[in-house]
Amino acid sequence: MSGRPTLRGGPAQPGRAGRGAQPGRAAQPARAERAARTPPPPSELVELEVGAVAHHGLCVARADGRVVFVRHALPGERVRARITDVSHDRYWRADAVEVLVASPDRVEPPCPHARPGLCGGCDWQHASLDAQRRLKARVVEDSLRRIAGLDLTVLVEALTSAAPDGLGWRTRMRFSRTPDGGVGLRAHRSHRVVATPDCRIADPLLASVIADPSFLQGPASPDRTGQAVELVAMPASPPDGEPGAVAYSTRSGRWQVVQVPAGEGGAEPEGQRSDSPPPEAEVQVVETVEGRRFHLEPGVFWQVHPTAAATLVAAVRDAAGAAPGDTALDLYSGAGLFAAFLAAAVGPTGQVIAVESDEAAVRSAARSLADLPWVSLRALRVTPATVSRLTGGSARPGIDVAVLDPPRTGAGREVMTALLAHRPRRVVYVACDPAALGRDVAVAAGEGYRLTGLRAFDIFPMTSHVECVAILEPTSASDPAQAGAVAGEHTGDAGQGVRGFALQ
Ligand SMILES: C[S@@+](CC[C@H](N)C(=O)[O-])C[C@H]1O[C@@H](n2cnc3c(N)ncnc32)[C@H](O)[C@@H]1O
């Protein structure tokens, strides 16, 4: 076992490998040095000492001074890795194919398809769930440090009511047809479809559907290689729900209901087989959170883990601290999940303005929140202009509390600036990408808002994804608690005035 990587190449050189390095962010080598290197063939095996975790389920290693982002590895391991991508000047990619010295956090992946070169759906099946959460916490900390200049200690919380093995949770999935007519998921960073007939993170209802030969031969199954089918598990919603039913998109783009055979994840109501689906207009997925029902058109955004919506509602409500009579904003409001519970907090003397660009989601919200007339649903794109105008003509000018849950790219500088110009007393930022959170927190700092709380949740076990709920509040020297917290960021005054994390 050699102590050196076996890569050919030029002299070792500085880079930004180690803690904080990200694909696309490593240092740019000098042009002459780049030209002098001879990249190995992509399939070459190298031995690597694996360093810190990076984003996207990768760890950082070095080979002859070059940054190598390694998948299927863990920090502290020594692995034999196959180079998979040498197309970047600044870094290469590799898959650990053999573990020479294993991390104590390593476990046997529960899924046979979570292996180098196979399914790209999960990133951390080879780490214990506890270790997965620690890795995700480091990624959040790292993003906030590098991008927003904040030194925090983050704890990623397990969902209290989730399955303890981290499997069987994904209620919305997009499968594709394999060359031999089965269904599968894409390989990592590839269009290649890998057969996953027994995907271990799929909700049991979806697992039953893809394992059912009649589904694979039925009209809903994709009919050419690579064609996709979206499956949505429909939870039982007594008394009038469709327990055990699953909605899916057909190759013609329609949504239908398929019934899971009785005993394989759900009941089959008499006379409702997949060959007699109800008309498209009737297809609804009913999700229930704290007793409130949300009637969703199947394609609209909803949290994919069955207990994530309730967890996030509780965290957002607690973080927002909305009071009766407040005006609350819900940006990127989807089917009205947070708007509904903000409405309960502000009551009929307050108002909630919910902004969402997907008309199907707004229709779903209108159906679900019809009993809350003080919620104003706006089918609009969130832009600097729309955000600036939100309270124009409103009975109550000004925004007391704002919640935003943007897509992976984040809200961005202009939207953040327009939002914070309303000077809400508190902003709750729900983030599915730590880097976007870091960028928007940095913008907020420039607008006089500081991070005063952060919780992170493991709502996507086995993957590298993590969900954060951050609190931003105006920096105010006149508020002793806030002034203490500001100082704490730089002096090691742990946690004063801050919820959910300890400051270092
Ligand atoms: C992460 S989801 C959040 C939905 C909701 N908060 C929930 O938890 O169910 C983001 C939502 O933003 C919407 N969206 C994306 N870009 C948007 C934009 N520029 N303006 C308004 N809505 C947008 C998407 O349609 C999606 O419903």
Image: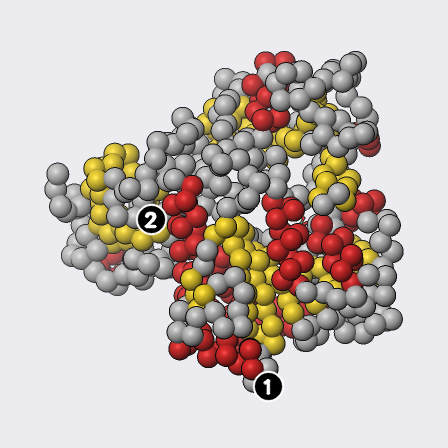
Q: Are marks 1 and 2 in contact (CB under 8 Å)?
A: no
* Residue positioned 83% across, 72% down in the render: 396
Q: Residue furthest left?
A: 2
Describe the element under mark 1 as helix, strand or loop. loop
Residue 425 seen in this snapshot:
yes
The C terminus - image quarter: bottom left
Q: Amino acid at mark 1?
A: Ser
Looking at the picture, tell me which residue is in the foreground, 245 or 177: 245
Q: Nearer the viewer, mark 1 or mark 2?
A: 1
* Quadrant for the N terminus in the image: top left
Task: Identify the image quadrant of residue 146.
Answer: bottom left
Q: Which residue is mark 1?
A: 478
- Identify the disc placed on residue 487: none
From the image, tell me which residue sits under label 2.
Answer: 59
- Asked whether residue 81 is in view, the answer is no
Mark 1 or mark 2, earlier in chain: 2
